[in-house]
Amino acid sequence: MEDFVAAVASPGTNERLQFARQVVMGKGIDPATEAGTNQMRRYLEERTTSVGYSAVQSRKAVLDDPGADSLDRRTLFRNRGLTFNTSIFINLAIDQALDAIKAKGLVRPGKVQRIAVVGPGLELNDKQDGYDFYPPQTIQPFAIVDSLIRLGLGRPAEIQVTAFDLSPRIIQHIEAARTRARAARPYMLVLPRNVDRPWTPSLVTSWKRFGHHIGEETKSVAPPPSAGRVEVRTVLVRPSVVLSTIPRDLDIILQRLEPSSAGGQFDLILATNILIYYDLFEQSLAVANIAKMLRPGGLFLSNDPISELPTTPITSVGSTDATYMNLPGIGEAGDRIVWYQRR
Ligand SMILES: C[S@@+](CC[C@H](N)C(=O)[O-])C[C@H]1O[C@@H](n2cnc3c(N)ncnc32)[C@H](O)[C@@H]1O
């Protein structure tokens, strides 16, 4: 706590610390003064308690309660603030889901062109192990292109990704990547793997091949010794792939793109780890907006199961269980990706 408070007071060029400083300054706290340092310490303690311990406890209470209504599970984070963190794992689950969807013949090879990622997120630091030896990065808009090309479901020159987010930080991050791409600079994706974690063989396979269809592998930055036993892959995403992602400031609960302004409806929409932050009413509005933006027969993939309402023309047509690892004493960690199709 003390080290963090001191670092936030003098962030230097560290992007993460600059962000933390912005957050506390936004709360009226000036970390450069002694009074501000004390306020910041109190603020951090308060947030650690409410976001950390109590949130974990309430999550555990709902998950452990056999009588807990499934609605409680589906809206588990409704009273939490929004977060934009993301990780590589969900993308590996989506990759496996698309593999299964292809095997079922639910999509025509080469025909997935227009994709929307709702809430792509920004990996501010590695969620599981806390690594922060590489810059913040967004993963999902590039990962989906990699999967679609690998599976022959989309053609590189035709794929267009729209990244919808209500966070200006994410929109600006993607805009900045596009500006660099226009100057022929690639986007660096860093994929660390703690080799002491018991990843399943299929997760390791997905991790090893991630990025082969969107860029070139390059020499990775060396992790600091404090990072422990970590293997790192670094992929430089081609500028053309970066330019095929267009960020759009949109709140999926309240807004949608009309097909005419978007140049047609989407073939595929992803929304992972986002609906769980909303209550049932808000989720229903989001799903109605998603359904409107999806072409008939188009697919919507999510790891947050939705309530299928008669008024919304979306039906679940299958699911994939992706297991990331087996944690001793805890059990399997993974995601169920539910496939929904627009009627
Ligand atoms: C927890 S992150 C998940 C990121 C990524 N999809 C994943 O599964 O790792 C949630 C993302 O959704 C965005 N978000 C939250 N509410 C939203 C809304 N109503 N409309 C659009 N984006 C939203 C956040 O800014 C963030 O990018």
Image (cartoon, rainbow, N blue to C red):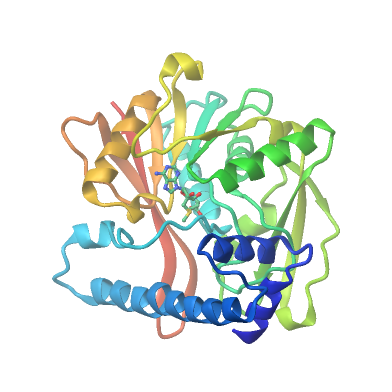
Q: Residue at x 53, y 23 (%)?
A: 111
Q: Residue at x 63, y 42 (%)?
A: 172
Q: Position of residue 62 (x, y in %)?
A: 24, 71
Left or right: where 235 falls relative to 120: right
Q: Position of residue 230 (x, y in %)?
A: 71, 74
Question: Which image quadrant is residue 198 in?
Answer: bottom right
Quarter of the picture holding the C terminus: top left
**Vertical placement of 212 versus 220: above or below?**
above
Q: Residue at x 48, y 37 (%)?
A: 102
How many marks on residues? 0
Q: Position of residue 24 (x, y in %)?
A: 56, 66
Q: Is residue 197 visible?
A: no
Question: Which image quadrant is residue 21 in?
Answer: bottom right
Quarter of the picture holding the N terminus: bottom right
Left or right: where 105 falls relative to 135: left
Question: Of all residues shown, which one is farthest toward the left?
Answer: 67
Left or right: where 187 falls relative to 342: right
Q: Residue at x 21, y 40 (%)?
A: 308
Q: Is residue 57 visible?
A: yes
Q: Position of residue 189 (x, y in %)?
A: 71, 53
